[in-house]
Image: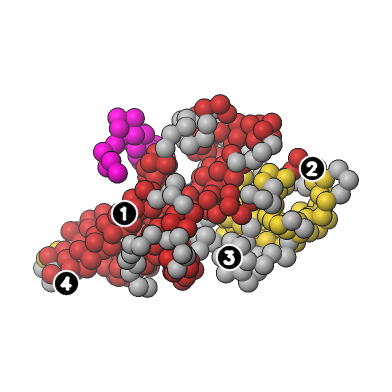
Amino acid sequence: MNFDLTDEQEMLRDAARRFAGKHYSFTQRRSIMATGDGFSPAAWQAYAEMGWLGLELPEAVGGLECSFVETVLLMEEFGRVLALEPFASSAILCAAIVNKSGNQSQRTALLQSLIEGRVLLALAHSEAGDRYARRGPMHSGAVPTGDGFVLNGEKTLAFDAPSADHLVVSARLETGVGLFLVPKAAAGLGVKGYRLIDGTQAGDVVLRDVRLPESALLIEPARAIEVLEEALDRTVLAQIAEAVGAMEAVLEITNIYLKQRVQFGQTIGKFQALQHRMSEMFIEVQETRSMLYRGMAHLGADPVVRAAAISAAKVVAGNAAKFVGTQGIQLHGGIGMTEEYAVGHYYKRLVVLERRYGDCDFHTERFMRSAAEPKFPNHVIEVKSP
C-alpha cells in the first residue's frame, strides 16, 4: 500500500483544511448547531461547488471518480472541526447505494442532484430491537400492487432523516429485502426528529400505506443486502477516518492546555504522569490510523475478509475514541465538562461515532463470525479487547 499522497490528494486535504479553518471555528460551529437544520446549507452548497459530494461517483454523472483515499482525507478534516453536515449519510452511504441501482435513468438523475447539492438522502434501515443487525428479522414490508408498491413499517435511528429530501428504506418483499426510494413528502410517511448528544440529527420513521411507483425500487431483493452491507462498510471506514481527525484534534487541544495551565508554580504539562497519559492517547490514535489503513486495503476484498478487517478497525477505533475522549476531559479538569469548551464536544462526537452503524460489541461479534467462516484466510487479525 502506497502511503504517499499525490499532488492532487494533498491539494484536496489543504483545501478542506483551509475551508474548515475559515468556516468552522468552535464559535461558528455552535451557532450552526443551534439552527433548525442543525447544519449549514451554505457549507453544503460549498461542498457541491468544490466537487466533494461526488468524490467517488462516476464522471458520467458529474462525479470526480476519485479513490476512497480522497474520501478518507476529507473525513479526517471534517473530524478535526466536528463538521455537522450529513456528508457520511448522504454523500457516502446513500450515494453508494443509489450508484448500484439498476434503474439507470433514476440513478443518473438522483446522483446528479446529489452531486449538485440539490438533494439530501438518508438511510432508514434499523428497527427496534435489531441491535445493528443488517440481515436480521425485518418487520417493515412492501406489498406489490398493479403499478408499484405499498410500504408499511417503522424504522428507528435514521441518521440525518429530518433534513433529508428522500429516504432509502429497506422493506421485505416475498422474495427478500428490497431498498426503496421514498420521498419525504410521500403521503403516509412520518419522521419524528430529535438531536443526538453531539448535536447531529436522527429520526424515527413511520410508514403507513405509503404508495410508491414501480420505479421506487432502487435495489431488488437479489442484491439489496449485499449492496447495503458494502455501503455500510464504506461508511464505517469513512467515519473511522472522521474519528481519527477528531482524536488528533483532542490531542492538539489538550497539549496546548497542558502547556498553558499553571499549578504549583509550573505548567502541568511538565508532570510526568500527565505526559504518560498524553503518550497513551497518541498511541491509541496511531493504532486506529493503522487499522484504518488496513481496512482501506481490504475494502475491495471478498465480503467475508472485508467484514473482518473493517469490524476489527471499528473495534480498535471505538475503544480508542472512548479512551482519548475521556482522557481529554480528565486532563482539562472541570473546564472540560463545560459546554463553552471544545473538548467536551469532541468527546460527545466520539461517543456517537463509536455507536454509529454498530458499536464495539456488535463489531467484535461480527469479526468473530467472519473469522470462523471456512473461506476466511489462515492468518490472524489481532483485535484489542474492549
Question: Do the CB atoms of the residues marked 2 and 4 lie less than 8 Å apart?
Answer: no
Residue under the point 42% across and 37% down: 67
Residue under the point 30% across and 32% down: 6
- CA–CA distance in space, label 2 to label 1: 44 Å
Quick one: label 2 or label 1, which is nearer the N terminus? 2
Q: Quadrant of the C terminus?
A: bottom left
> Which-is-in-front pick, marks 4 and 1?
1
Secondary element at image label 3: loop
Could you classify mark 2 by the number of other residues whose Cα lies within 10 Å: few (under 14), some (14-19), or many (20 or more)? some
Front residue of 166/384: it is: 384
**Label 4: which residue?**
273
- CA–CA distance in space, label 2 to label 4: 64 Å
**Label 2: which residue?**
214
Residue 351 inside the magenta-drawn segment: no
- CA–CA distance in space, label 3 to label 2: 27 Å
> Which disc is residue 289 wearing?
1
> Which-is-in-front pick, marks 2 and 1?
2
**Magenta part of the chain:** 1-24
Q: Residue furthest front?
A: 374
Residue under the point 45% across and 68% down: 372
- CA–CA distance in space, label 3 to label 4: 42 Å
Secondary element at image label 2: helix
Quick one: label 3 or label 2, which is nearer the N terminus? 3
- Dominant SS of magenta comes to helix
Quick one: label 3 or label 4, which is nearer the N terminus? 3
Q: Quadrant of residue 141?
A: bottom right
Label 2 is placed on what type of residue?
A: Glu
Front residue of 330/120: it is: 120
Question: Do the CB atoms of the residues marked 2 and 1 lie less than 8 Å apart?
Answer: no
